[in-house]
Image (spheres, coloured by chain):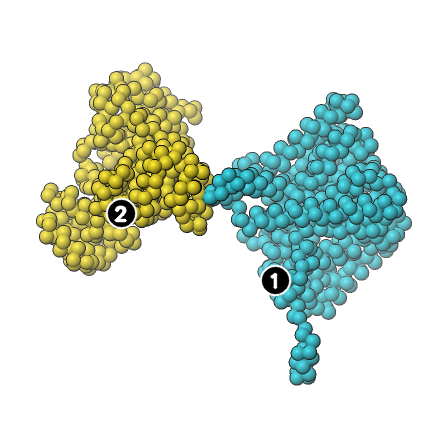
Chain colours: A cyan, B yellow
Amino acid sequence: MAVRSARVSSVVPRRAVGVDIGGALNLVGAMLRYLALAFLFPTGIALGYGEPVWPFLASGAITAVAGFGLERITTGRDRIGAREGFFVVSVTWLLAALFVSLPYLFAEPQLRHPVDAYFEAMSGMTTTGASVLTDIPALDHSVAMWRQLSQWLGGMGIIVLALAVLPRLRVGGRQLMEYEAPGPELEPLAASIRATARRLWFLYLGLTGAMILVLTVVAYTGLDEAMTFYEAVAHALTTLPTGGFSTRARSIEEFGAVSQWVIAVFMVVAGANFALTYRALVRGQLRAPIRDEELRLYLGLLALASIVLFLDLVREGIHTGEEAVRHAVFQASSIMTTTGYASVDFAVLWTGLAALVLVMLMFVGGSAGSTGGAIKPIRILLTGRILRRELDQTVHPEAVLPIRFNGLVVHERTLRAIGAFVLLYLAVFAVGALVIAIDSGRADLNVGAFDAIAAAATTIGNAGPAFGLAGPMGAFAPFSPLSKEAMILHMWMGRLELIPIAVLFTRSYWRA
Amino acid sequence: MKIFVVGAGQVGATVVEALHSEHDLTLIDLDPGRLSALSNRYELRPVQGNAASRRVLQEAGLVDGALFIACTSRDETNIVAAMFAKRLAPEITTIVRTTREEYVEIWRERELEIDHVVSTELETAHAVSRLIGVPAARQTDIFAEGQVQMVEFDVEEGAQADLVGLPLRRAEIPPDSKVASIIRGDRTIVPRGDESIEPGDRIVVIGSPEAARAWSQLLSRSDRAVDDVVIVGAGETGVAIARLLLEQQIRVRMLEADAARAREVAELLPEVRVFHTSGLEQDFIERERIGHARAAILAMPEDAKNLYAATLAKLHGVRFTVAIVHDPLAADVFERAGVDVAVNPRTVTAEEIVRFAHDPRVLQLSMLEGDRFEVLDITVREDSALCGKAFRELPMTGSLIGAIVRDGRAIFPHGDDMLQPGDRAIIFTESSRVPQVERAL
C-alpha cells in the first residue's frame, strides 16, 4: 500500500493542504452544540403565549445533532492553530446563521423562501437589523423574540461566548477572539483570555439588564404608554448589540419621547469600547476613558453629526424644538453606532443633505471593542494620521515619524493592516453597490444609485436601514435573491471585519 | 581624608590629579601599566587587582577609608565594588560612575546601596546645557501634589545681572520662590537677605512650578538664548542632552545614521523630530534648514565625524557648535579648528566626582541629598506657638518655610503672612534640626 501510494503521488503530485480542516470543523461543531441551548428561550416564550413550540424544539434538535455529528466525524485538537482560526470563525458564523434561520423556515410564512430566512438570520446574527419582513406585527411573539435574541447573541460574539464556557479553547482562543472582536486590537481585561471573555459577557448582561430595568420603569410610571415589559426586553436585546431589530412596524417611532431618549443613551454606550465602559463602571477608573482618543473622536463625530442634522431639520422646518434635537441625536446615534433603529422615517421626510450625512455615518461605525460595525473611529483616526505622516514625509524624506495612539507607538505592521482594511472595505462596498445596482436594474426595481450605495453601505456596516424601498419603515423583501445574497455576504464580511474571510480566498492560506 | 579610587583610566586619572595633593589616595586597577603610570606621577598607593573582589578591597585596607570612588568604565564593576566597600566599611561614602541612566533611576528610587551616582551621560548633558546657555535644573523634587518644587541649579558666569552678585533682599527673585540654600566651595549657606548669589554657586530654590521655570530663565545666559537645537548622533549622550533641552521647552531635532536607533529614539521622545541620516550631506542640511538652528551639538561616537559635522554646521550658518570629544587630547585641536566648545564626557564626569569629594556634605555620614537637609511636609498643630505670628517675627534658625498649603492651594509666604492651624508647611531644614522643627509646629 505504501509503495503504491508513493507511486501515485509521484505521478499526480498531491499538494498538501496546510490547513487542518478536520480539527477546525471539530471546534465549529463543539460551538454549534452550545447554540442549541439558545432555542430554549423562544420555546419558553411560545409556551407562555400558547404559540407552536415545535419549530424551536426541532431547530434546537437539528442544531444539536449537527453540532455533535460534526464533532464526532472529525478529530479534535487540543489547541487550534492561528491558521485554522480564520476558518473556524468564518464557518461558525455562516453555519450559526443557517441554524438560526430554521425557525423562520418552519414557522413564519413571510420567510418561506430560504434566502429570505437566511437573510433575516444573518441580519440578526451580524446585528445588522436589515429586514425582509413587510408585516412585523404579524409575527408570533416567539418568532419576534427569536429575532431579537439572535441579535443579542451575535452582538458580543458567539466565539466570545464559547471562549467563556468552552474549556478546550484555553489555548489559541485569543486568536479566535481577535478575529471576531471588532477593531484592530483586542484590549485584554484580565490575564487570561477566558476571564476577559467572561467579563465582557458579564458587562453585556449587566447593561442589558439595566436597560430592561430602566425601560420597565418608564413603562410602569406611565411616562410612555406604548412601552411594556415585553417591549423593554425586546428592545434591550437589540440595543446593546447595536442590532436594530424591532417588534414594531414603525420601529422606535411608536414609542414616546422618554423611551427614545433612553434608547439613544444606551445606543451610545453600546457603540463605545466595552473595555473602557468596564473600567469606568466596574473599576471606577475614569481617567483612561476620558483621555481615550478613539472615544473622543467617537463622541465628537456623534455630536457633529447631530448638530448638522439638527440645523438641517430646523432650517427645513421638518421638526422643531425638542423633537428636532431628539430625532437628530437619535438618528445620528442609531446610524453611527450601526444600530439602525428609526425614530422617524428619515428616508422619506428628511432632506438629501441629511441622507448624505447618515450614509457617511454608516462608514464610521461604533468604537473598537464595541458591538458596532463598520470601519470604526480608531481606524479613521489612524488612517488620518497615516495620511498626515505621508504629507509630512513628502517634505521631509529623512524624518522618522512613528504614529501614536493614546500616546503609545502603533506598530508599522498594524498600520499597514489598517490601511489594507480600509481599502478592502471600500472595495467590497463598491462591488456590492455595483451588484445591487445592476441586479436591481435587471429586475426592474426602482433602486437609484444613491439607494444602491446606501443598501451596500448599510449591510457591510451592519447598520440596518437604507433609503428608497429599503428605508427604515420599508423592507428588503423586493430585492432579487442575487442582491440579497450579495447583502448576506456583505453582512457576514462586515461583522467579521473582512480579513478573516478574505484570507480564505487566497491561495497561500491553503498551501502547506 | 583617606580616599580609594577604583579605575586608572581617563576619569580616574583626572580625579587623582585633582585630589592627590590634599588627600591620602589609594588607586586600584587591573592594569599594572596604567597603575604605574599614575603612581609614578602622583603620590599614591597603587593596588593591582579587581576591585569587584572583596579580598582585594580588604587587602587594600579599606576598613578605615572615608571615601570610595568607583570610576572604571564598567558600570557593573563599579556598582559591585561600591557595594562590597559599603559592607566592609559601613562608614565609608561611596561614589559610583555609571554610563547607564537606568542605574541612576534605580539609585534615585533608593534601590542601590550607593551614596552617590555620577552618570557620564547626565553630566555631559548638563555641561552641554550650561554651555548653550540654558542651565537645566540638576535635580527636581516635587511636594504638595506638584504645587511646590524644590530645584537645584548651577549658577554660571553671565547669568542675569539683576540677580547675581546682589544681596538677596535687593535681587529680583521670581515671585513665589525662595533660595533655600547656597552651596559655595566647601560651605553650605542657608541665606539671609544680605547674602548674595555668586557665579559658580550651586543653589537650591523652593517655589511654585512657574517660579522654577522663571529661575531657569533667569539663570540662562541672556546673550546666548537658544530655542532651536540640532543634535547629531542619538546615542545615550544625545538622548540625555535632548531630554534636558526639552524640559526647557527648546525645539530639538536629532540626526541619527542608524535606522533602528533613529526609530527607537523617535518612539522614545515624541517631542523630538528625528531624522534618519548621517547629517553630513549638504543636500539634507540645505533642505531641512539645519543652518537656522541656533546651536548644533555633535554627539556621534567618532570624534573626527563630530569635527567634520561641526565645521559643516558652521558653514551653513549655525552660530554655536558643541562637540562631544572622547580623545582627551583632541579637545584643544577641535576648539582651534573652529568648534566653539569641545566637551569631554570623562573630564566632565571626573570634575563632578571631584566636586563631590570637596563637597561639605561628603563629610557627613552619607551624602544623599536628603541627609544633611530635609524637606518636611508638616501639618501645623492648633496649639503651636508659631501660629498667628507674622513670618517676619518667626525666629531665625537654620530652617526655612518654603511654602504652605492652605485649603489645598499652595501659598508662598511673605513677611506679613501668618501660619494658621491646619496649614501644611513645606519646610527646608538641616537634618539635625528636624526634631526641633517638629516640636515647634
Give the residue displayed 31% in from the left and 49% down from the top. Answer: B302
Q: Residue at x 43, y 41 (%)?
A: B284
Location of the C terminus of chain B by quadrant is top left
Name the residue rendered at 77%, 23% in the picture. Answer: A316
* Residue under label 1: A81
Q: Quadrant of residue A304?
A: top right
Q: Residue at x 16, y 58 (%)?
A: B32
**Camera-side mark, 1 or 2:** 2
Viewer-proximal residue among B370 and A356: A356
Give the percent coordinates (x, y) of residue B45: 12, 53
Q: Amino acid at mark 2?
A: His
Figure quadrant of residue B290: top left
**Residue type of the residue flagged with mark 1:** Gly
| x and y percentages locating residue A281 in the rendered image | 59, 39
Residue picked out by circle 2: B326
Q: How many marks?
A: 2
Farthest top residue in view: B416
Left or right of residue A146: residue B32: left
| For residue A455, above or below residue B382 | below
- Looking at the image, residue A269 sits to the left or right of residue A142; the answer is left
Secondary element type, mark 2: loop
Residue A22, relative to residue B216: is it above or below? below
Q: Secondary structure at mark 1?
A: loop
- Chain ID for label 1? A
Asked which quadrant contains residue A239, the reply is: top right
Whether discs 1 and 2 lie on one chain: the answer is: no
